[in-house]
Amino acid sequence: AQSVTQLDSQVPVFEEAPVELRCNYSSSVSVYLFWYVQYPNQGLQLLLKYLSGSTLVKGINGFEAEFNKSQTSFHLRKPSVHISDTAEYFCAVSLTSFGGSQGNLIFGKGTKLSVKP
Amino acid sequence: EAQVTQNPRYLITVTGKKLTVTCSQNMNHEYMSWYRQDPGLGLRQIYYSMNVEVTDKGDVPEGYKVSRKEKRNFPLILESPSPNQTSLYFCASISAGHSNGYTFGSGTRLTVV
């Protein structure tokens, strides 16, 4: 079975500072990896995804993530955050073979990023 | 615009009164899924459907039903809602090719009193 651990439930940071949101996963087979963002009172929006190829993935709004297979991690980073980045961020995995519950996204419990002026 | 549409956005109901949350996608996706989001628990899958007339239970199916009579629609049915079903619900869809990730609806906030 797959699982996702987001190591920080809350991350406070000052505007223009760098931020890293940590995500570790557990799986005995290949997975796809995703980061989603949820702004207050809104749905989930895909930030970026890793399917294969380059381990450094760039997403929307200046975010990037690095897939590290040996450490089973997929940490999300941004070099300089803005007030508008305040949101909850979810890391998720799914199996690479599609079908049945293998299409299921397994989510972490989320990290609330709070950007202060 | 490619999207997943859920209705209603907000719903307050009483215990035991049957309700349906609708979900529709316009991307011709084969796979659709329902999740519930609860504080500190992240998102958990309730039911999923691989195609028309093919549905199966996810991780937390108790108290819910679904149907998939048409490819675009995947309603979530609560036959007898209880207060522990108070939650934020999301519908999502994905193509069988899987490469673009899931598209989520805007969510339905359900309160059962």
Image (cartoon, helix red, strand yellow):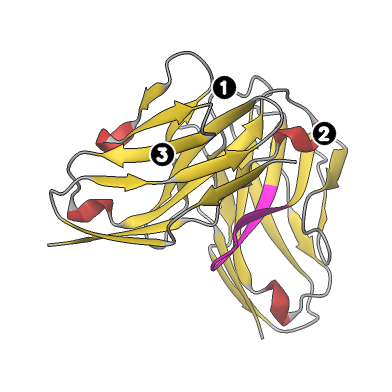
Q: Are marks 1 and 2 on the same chain?
A: yes
Q: Are marks 3 and 2 on the same chain?
A: no
Pair 3/2: label in front: 3
Q: Position of residue A15 (x, y in %)?
A: 14, 54
- Residue range corresponding to the magenta coloring: B34-45
Q: Nearer the viewer, mark 1 or mark 2?
A: 1
Q: CA distance from mark 3 to mark 2?
A: 37 Å
Q: CA distance from mark 1 to mark 2?
A: 21 Å
Q: Which mark is residue B52?
A: 2
Q: Tally the marks.
A: 3
Q: Residue at x 84, y 64 (%)?
A: B62
The chain holding disc 3 is A
* Pair 1/3: label in front: 3
Report the amino acid beneath label 3: His
Which residue is depicted at the point 32% across and 45% down? A20
Q: Position of residue B16 (x, y in %)?
A: 81, 81
Left or right of A112? Residue B12 is right
Q: Chain of mark 2?
A: B
Which subunit holds the residue at mark 1?
B
Q: Secondary structure at mark 3?
A: strand
Relative to B9, residue B35 above or below: above
Instruction: Quickly name the residue at label 3.
Output: A75
Q: Is residue B89 placed above or below A60 in the rendered structure?
A: below
On the picture, is B100 further left or further right than B31? left
